Amino acid sequence: MTALVRPAARRADIRLPADHPPVSLGKIGVLLLNLGTPDATDYWSMRRYLKEFLSDRRVIEVPRLLWWPILNLIILTVRPGRKGKDYDTIWNKERNESPLKTISRSQAEKLAEALASVDDRIVVDWGMRYGNPSTPDRIRALQAAGCDRILLVPLYPQSCAATSATACDKAFESLMQLRWQPAVRVAPPWHDDPTYIEALAKTIEQKRAEIDFEPDMIIASFHGVPESYLLKGDPYHCQCMKTGRLLREALGLTKEKFMVCFQSRFGTEEWLKPYLIDTMGELPSKGIKKVMVIAPGFAADCLETLEEIEGENREHFMHHGGEKFAYVPCLNDSDNGIDVIRSVVIRELQGWI
């Protein structure tokens, strides 16, 4: 006969002595982490953001003695103005913030609603690796709310040192400053999670039903990284390729109708190939003049999708003879998108809820 096991007493119900210093505990924090966003599009706001981003050793692995003068004397002099203009084209004027911040906030709010019936101790928050709201601020806020257990959820389906690892680095740095540290877990990547693949496929099919053409090619575009990162053991490339393969199979497409590309190359070093921008210029000459592009590596639309893919790459494709171009929005805060994050969170909270 199986013995009945009673659930442990709720940590929130623990009674403290009357003379005990005030303390909050018993809550479970879920912190969604994204890369970051500037606070505004002016020169100095962009410069602060780019300086923090491009000073990260996880992002730029060039020796400091070489990189410091390039960054401070050249890049941070010229690039803030250019990038500010790019951000202006997609900026959420109503809220005076980037789309990434708008979407990230909504993802956290909708996730909190989706988890409310699971366990009323769960507190959902969101933070950025670079910019605001900062990861250290949100960890302190969760602890102040009584969270003595926190699940960190880097919003990157594919793991990469320059994204998920650096997001966790910032969280760990903030934990180093705390005398009373919460217990912490980190959600692993979900590049091959069936819920994620199904959500991507549904999004593509929804877009296909909306447009007035049948794509000759569907392209999954991932943010690129230098090839040297792959050779040093970064799992990103392999996970991107697996996502692409699983998505192609879910859509029932042949290899001739689907391909994986990489975008956002920076600097002169060789990056993961094929480059999306080059591919957009080459496809029309091969008779592929109607394309659909999706960005499965982004959990939320941002500069790299809205300005670079839907703007720059669309224009490049049409200029070289393309006829039809469709961009499939990221999962964002859609029902499908929240289902994916909820699935990951529920799985990783087992034993705590």
Image (cartoon, rainbow, N blue to C red):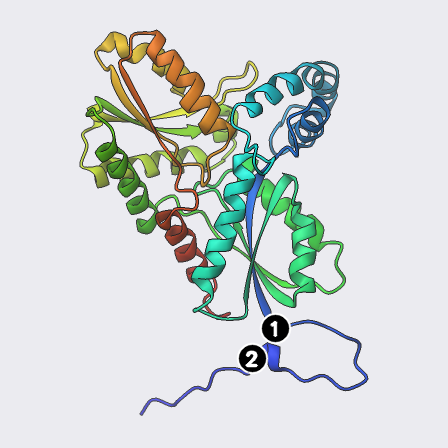
The image position of residue 249, as x and y in percent, is: 22, 38
Q: Would you say the residues marked 1 and 2 are in contact, meaning their CB atoms lie under 8 Å apart?
A: yes
Left or right of 325, for residue 35: right
Q: Amino acid at mark 1?
A: Gly
Query: Which tag, 1 or 2, sits closer to the chain's start?
Result: 2
Looking at the image, residue 206 lies above or below residue 335? above
Residue at point 39%, 42% (across, down): 331
Relative side of 111 to 38, left or right: left
Image location of residue 189, percent across then percent down: 44, 47
Q: Is residue 253 above or below residue 184?
A: above
- Where does label 1 land, which residue? 26
Which residue is at 23% across, 41% downward? Answer: 250
Visible in this render: residue 237? yes
Q: Residue at x 67, y 85 (%)?
A: 15
State the separation of the CA atoms marked 1 and 2. Answer: 7 Å
Looking at the image, residue 320 lies above or below residue 248:
above
Q: Secondary structure at mark 2?
A: loop
Q: Residue furthest front?
A: 94
User: Could you say where residue 290 lies in the image, as x and y percent from the top left?
Assistant: 25, 19
* Disc 2 residue type (three-letter): Arg
Q: Which residue in the protein does label 2 denote?
A: 10
| Relative to 353, residue 251 above or below | above
- Position in image of residue 145 (x %, y %): 66, 65
